[in-house]
């Protein structure tokens, strides 16, 4: 069994809205294992994204603990969390969030140079990654507004993995893309996972969830069920789909 | 309209800090502009109004009473342009002194006149808080002009002590009056005394006569030429040389002199107002551009909802009109106390009191000018929303595509990614940054200039030494004619307290330049290189007997050049002199020449005084007291010490004789006196060789009392400038930083998600702004150095001070850093959460 990379203990997260406390995550215990492609699913408002932010150190829990290995990241200061994200995490957003005043290379280098020293090797590595994800040389000096949504998201993925993070977080990465572009992005994510990358992804899309090795279903801020699959491509897609569909039906999806 | 107001209010709420700063800057502009427009016309007219209100005479010729003949008036009547004329008698004492509020002697020239003669010159009402009975009960009542009241802070009932002709004369201040003539410490103050006191003064000082005349058109009559003709006729009539005894006070010159300092103040304040206004307009322009960029999607949504371009433009314009309205109201309210203060400053500077009229229309004009400019800039900028039709706006505008060359690609990063990102950010807003840089440059220029002026004016005497163009030593000695000046100077120099002694010559009689009908007061030095305050702005000092130097001011007034030959007359003698240069400073109508140069026109001339320069830390008053002990009393002091210390009958006789001699030497220029008095069988004899000193004055005190108001005004305006410049630095940097943070809010969120810390992002903003501030400060420094250099050339003293320039730059940098930090703190609020939940 793979080692646990992320762990929560009685994780709670609540928000105050007009004086009314809203408990989004309730006493959640969860383990994310090294090398897993974990997908978090659930109905709207079930706390998927909130859990992702808490796991990734983007947000601090109201109660409970989050461990990265043995380190309790929920006790980190903001600067420590920034360092944690810088070194150990990569992010792929639904809205992509490329910086529109920077070209493709600069968007990637903005993150890369935080961890790695500027060098020709780094530039070459980025170029290789871009080629690998279907971003040809002619696009390297383009700005986000000159790229398609799918191209942008693939640049976003390269930006997220360029520092070889131990864990890649993705928040509905195909949510704003058309189906062809979404497919390309999912292929890219699958490819990354095959190379050994741990991924935690939030989605409400069945086709996206099919890429996972483990599906966690949230309901009212707590884990309501878990479904484990073979890595994508190692089993029959139809039976995989049926199995996951059945699990989700059981969960009331 | 309501929907526009609602959107405007929402916009204002979003930028509270910037809006507040803009309100403050506009309020400052309004206050200054309002003050300038309302009060300066009033201040400029203080003197002409004063003359008009008191029915004062316009042109005056003052002469020694011994040379006056009432028949001269008939000669004046022959002039066609003269409409009224007359004369009044008074007593003048150039060497009179008085006690200031601290009890120190002040060598201020005073003139005494009785009420009957005063009425011939001016019809000023005598104002007093005292009752008629209280004034009648006074033994020696004196009516003081407002100029002296302000200088000495006198009130009714105070004692005003005049030191003249051998003793102290305490007067009681009965009240005050407005005067058109003799209202400053250099020209002297005219005191109205009772008939009885006037008769006493006639015995002690010099009776003089003022011949006055008014013309039909005082603004356009060449009264100088008229005076010259009149004096020539009088000389022809009396067969006397009158030129040297007559002093002219002509209306246009008096108006110009009275307004000179006010003009300087007006120029400084107007420049400050323009500077602040330019900054405000730039910030507004910048803010609107930024707002439009920032709210591009919202603009698209509004357009999609059916708002017209005009509605959206009006929304932005209205926001700034509301800010301007708030600023204008606050500024107008703060101008209400500032205007009277400024007016009072004008009164102090001009020596005249007036009734200020509140021209509210001027405030309205100031408000209209400001509102007009704000409206124009805001509307012009807000109209740029036309360039963004809905679809384009919803795509965050075409401008968001950055097709420009990437000058600082991260691929070429060598060390700090933060610095690289900062440079990128700077280049992307280059045009705006240049504008901000211009504001910083102007603010630095102002700050350097004003800091130097403020610091220099803190040390009044150093400032006056630097700018007056007159030699200001520590002690000014007048010596009796029989004293060997060189030997005396050498003797004084042996005193370890004395650093330097420079012989000097001064004559109250004027040189005239007939071709231009101009008069110059002579300043005579044999070795100009010894002087510390008088400097040559161009050319060199005179070295030979046929050479003279005039002032910078005279060069401009008469369009003179080095090498020109001027034929000067002194009395009836005329001699050509070659102009060797121009003296720096703000003085005018002064001719510098050597003793030989003076003797060329007046063979009897000899140097009559010494400048004594004391070593650091030596007390001037103590030194003057020591002089009396070592060299006997000065003729002046001897006059004041009547009867003191004499014990025997012979001593009393000798003291009385010395007193008489001193009065003759002081008041009538007598060179030498021998006396022999027979008392019974005893003959008591002596001569005037007892006196070596005519007077010993602390020059510094004289200068300080004469020009304190000017220095105060310059300092006040400089401090105001400093505040304005500081506000500009704070406002521009704050607005720039705030706008950068807001514009990059999302980028910073993305960067935070990548692991950038708040400190790194703040550093990025700092690196984008602070180097620009430094870069902008450098040309500001260079411009200020050039400006100060020009001023230094004019006044002849290097005002450039590297430590002060460094201090001013330090202030700019500190303000910029504090302001940038204050504004950049908002980066802390950038939340990755917020970004992801958008």
Image (spheres, coloured by chain):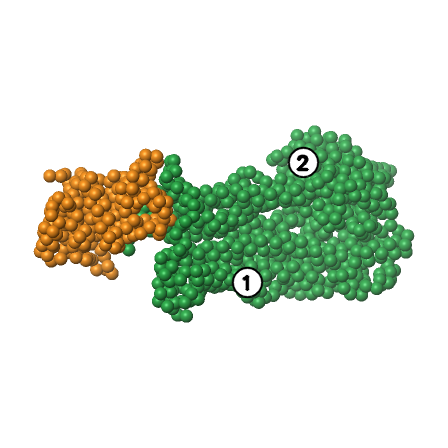
Chain colours: A orange, B green
Q: How many numbered badges does the structure rendering display?
A: 2
**Image position, residue B184 (x, y; %):** 68, 53
Who's the residue at 74% across and 34% down the image? B527
Mark 2 belongs to which subunit? B
Who's the residue at 41% across and 67% down the image? B308
Q: Secondary structure at mark 2?
A: strand
Residue B20 can be seen, yes or no: no
> Do badges 2 and 1 share one subunit?
yes
Q: Secondary structure at mark 1?
A: helix
Who's the residue at 81% across and 42% down the image? B577
- Of A59 and B421, which appears nearest the observer? B421
Mark 1 belongs to which subunit? B
**Which residue in the structure is indicated by mark 1?**
B369
- Of B16 and B361, which appears nearest the observer? B16
**Image position, residue B238 (x, y; %):** 90, 54
In terms of sequence position, does the residue under pointer 2 or pointer 1 come before the other? 1
Task: Tell whether label 1 touches label 2 (CB within 8 Å).
Answer: no
**Image position, residue B147 (x, y; %):** 66, 56
Residue B613, numbered circle: 2
State left or right for residue B477 relative to residue B828. right
């Amino acid at each position: 069994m793979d080692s646990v990379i992320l762990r929560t203990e009685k994780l709670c997260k609540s928000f105050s809205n007009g004086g009314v406390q809203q408990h989004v995550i309730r006493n959640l215990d969860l383990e994310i294992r090294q090398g897993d492609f974990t997908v978090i699913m659930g109905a709207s408002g079930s706390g998927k994204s909130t859990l992702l932010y808490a796991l990734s150190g983007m947000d601090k829990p109201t109660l409970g603990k989050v461990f990265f290995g043995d380190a309790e990241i929920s006790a980190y200061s903001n600067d420590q969390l920034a360092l944690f994200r810088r070194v150990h995490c990569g992010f792929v957003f639904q809205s992509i969030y490329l910086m529109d005043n920077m070209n493709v290379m600069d968007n990637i280098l903005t993150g890369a140079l935080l961890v790695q020293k500027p060098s020709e090797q780094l530039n070459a590595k980025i170029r290789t990654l871009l080629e690998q994800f279907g971003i040809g040389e002619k696009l390297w000096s383009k700005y986000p507004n000159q790229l398609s949504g799918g191209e942008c998201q693939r640049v976003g993925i390269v930006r997220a993995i360029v520092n070889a993070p131990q864990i890649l977080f993705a928040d509905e990465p195909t949510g704003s893309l058309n189906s062809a572009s979404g497919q390309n992005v999912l292929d890219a994510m699958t490819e990354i996972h095959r190379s050994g990358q741990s991924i935690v992804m939030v989605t409400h899309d069945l086709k996206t969830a099919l890429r996972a090795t483990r599906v966690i279903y949230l309901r009212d801020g707590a884990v309501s069920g878990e479904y484990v699959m073979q890595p994508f491509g190692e089993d029959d897609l139809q039976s995989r789909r049926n199995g996951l569909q059945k699990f989700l039906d059981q969960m009331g999806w | 309209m309501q929907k526009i107001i609602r959107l405007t209010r929402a916009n204002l709420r979003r930028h509270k800090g910037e809006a507040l700063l803009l309100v403050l800057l506009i309020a400052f502009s309004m206050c200054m502009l309002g003050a300038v427009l309302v009060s300066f016309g009033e201040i400029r007219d203080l003197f002409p109004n004063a003359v008009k209100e008191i029915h004062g005479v316009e042109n005056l010729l003052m002469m020694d009473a011994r040379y006056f003949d009432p028949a001269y008036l008939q000669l004046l009547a022959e002039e066609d342009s003269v409409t009224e004329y007359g004369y009044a008698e008074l007593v003048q004492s150039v060497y009179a002194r008085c006690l200031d509020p601290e009890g120190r002697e002040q060598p201020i020239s005073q003139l005494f006149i009785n009420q009957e003669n005063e009425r011939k010159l001016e019809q000023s009402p005598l104002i007093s808080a005292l009752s008629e009975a209280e004034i009648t009960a006074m033994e020696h009542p004196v009516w003081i002009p407002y100029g002296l009241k302000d200088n000495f802070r006198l009130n009714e009932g105070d004692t005003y002590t005049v030191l003249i002709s051998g003793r102290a004369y305490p007067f009681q201040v009965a009240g005050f009056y407005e005067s058109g003539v003799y209202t400053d410490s250099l020209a002297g103050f005219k005191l109205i005394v009772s008939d009885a006191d006037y008769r006493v003064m006639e015995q002690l000082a010099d009776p003089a006569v003022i011949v006055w005349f008014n013309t039909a058109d005082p603004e356009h009559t060449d009264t100088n030429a008229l005076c010259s003709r009149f004096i020539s006729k009088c000389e022809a009539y009396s067969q006397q040389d009158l030129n040297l005894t007559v002093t002219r006070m002509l209306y246009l010159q008096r108006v110009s002199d009275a307004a000179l300092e006010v003009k300087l103040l007006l120029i400084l304040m107007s420049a400050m107002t323009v500077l602040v206004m330019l900054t405000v307009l730039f910030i507004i322009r910048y803010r609107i551009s930024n707002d439009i960029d920032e709210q591009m999607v919202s603009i698209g949504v509004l357009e999609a909802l059916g708002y017209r371009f005009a509605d959206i433009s009006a929304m932005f314009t209205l926001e700034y009109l509301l800010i301007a309205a708030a600023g204008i109201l606050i500024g107008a309210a703060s101008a209400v106390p500032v205007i009277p203060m400024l007016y009072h400053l004008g009164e102090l500077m001009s020596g005249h009191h007036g009734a200020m009229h509140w021209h509210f229309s001027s405030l309205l004009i100031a408000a209209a000018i400001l509102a007009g400019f704000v409206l124009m800039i805001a509307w012009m900028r807000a109209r740029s929303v036309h360039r963004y039709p809905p679809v384009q706006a919803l795509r965050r505008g075409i401008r968001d595509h950055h097709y420009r060359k990437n000058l600082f690609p991260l691929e070429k990063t060598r060390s700090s990614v933060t610095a690289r990102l900062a440079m990128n950010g700077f280049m992307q807003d280059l045009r705006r940054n240049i504008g901000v840089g211009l504001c910083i440059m102007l603010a630095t220029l102002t700050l350097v200039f004003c800091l130097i002026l403020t610091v220099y004016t803190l040390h009044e005497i150093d400032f006056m030494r630097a700018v007056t163009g007159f030699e200001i030593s520590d002690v000014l000695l007048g010596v009796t004619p029989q004293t060997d000046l060189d030997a005396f100077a050498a003797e004084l120099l042996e005193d370890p307290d004395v650093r330097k002694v420079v012989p000097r010559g001064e004559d109250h009689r004027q040189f005239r330049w007939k071709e231009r009908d101009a008069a110059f007061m002579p300043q005579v030095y044999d070795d100009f290189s010894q002087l510390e305050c008088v400097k040559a702005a161009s050319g060199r000092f005179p070295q030979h007997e046929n050479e003279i130097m005039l002032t910078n001011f005279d060069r401009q007034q008469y369009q003179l050049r080095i090498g020109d030959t001027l034929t000067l007359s002194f009395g009836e003698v005329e001699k050509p002199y070659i102009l060797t240069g121009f003296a720096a400073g703000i003085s005018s109508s002064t001719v510098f020449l050597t003793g030989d140069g003076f003797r060329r026109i007046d063979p009897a001339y000899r140097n009559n005084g010494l400048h004594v320069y004391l070593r650091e830390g030596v007390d001037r008053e103590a030194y003057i007291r020591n002089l009396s002990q070592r060299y006997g009393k000065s003729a002046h002091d001897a006059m004041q010490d009547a009867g003191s210390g004499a014990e025997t009958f012979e001593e009393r006789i000798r003291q009385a004789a010395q007193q008489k001699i001193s009065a003759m030497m002081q008041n009538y220029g007598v060179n030498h006196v021998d006396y022999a008095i027979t008392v019974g069988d005893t003959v008591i004899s002596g001569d005037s060789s007892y006196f070596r000193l005519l007077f010993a004055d602390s020059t510094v005190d004289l200068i300080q009392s004469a020009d304190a108001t000017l220095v105060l005004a310059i300092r006040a305006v400089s401090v105001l400038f400093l505040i304005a410049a500081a506000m500009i630095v704070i406002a521009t940097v704050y607005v720039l930083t705030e706008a950068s943070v807001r514009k990059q809010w999302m980028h910073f969120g993305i960067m935070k998600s990548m692991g950038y810390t708040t400190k790194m992002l703040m550093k990025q903003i700092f690196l984008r702004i602070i180097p620009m501030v430094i870069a902008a400060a450098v040309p500001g420094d260079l411009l200020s150095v050039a400006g100060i250099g020009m001023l230094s050339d004019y006044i002849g003293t290097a005002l450039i001070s590297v430590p002060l320039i460094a201090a001013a730059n330090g202030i700019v940098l500190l303000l910029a850093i504090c302001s940038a930090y204050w504004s950049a703190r908002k980066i802390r609020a950038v939340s990755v959460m917020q970004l992801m939940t958008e």
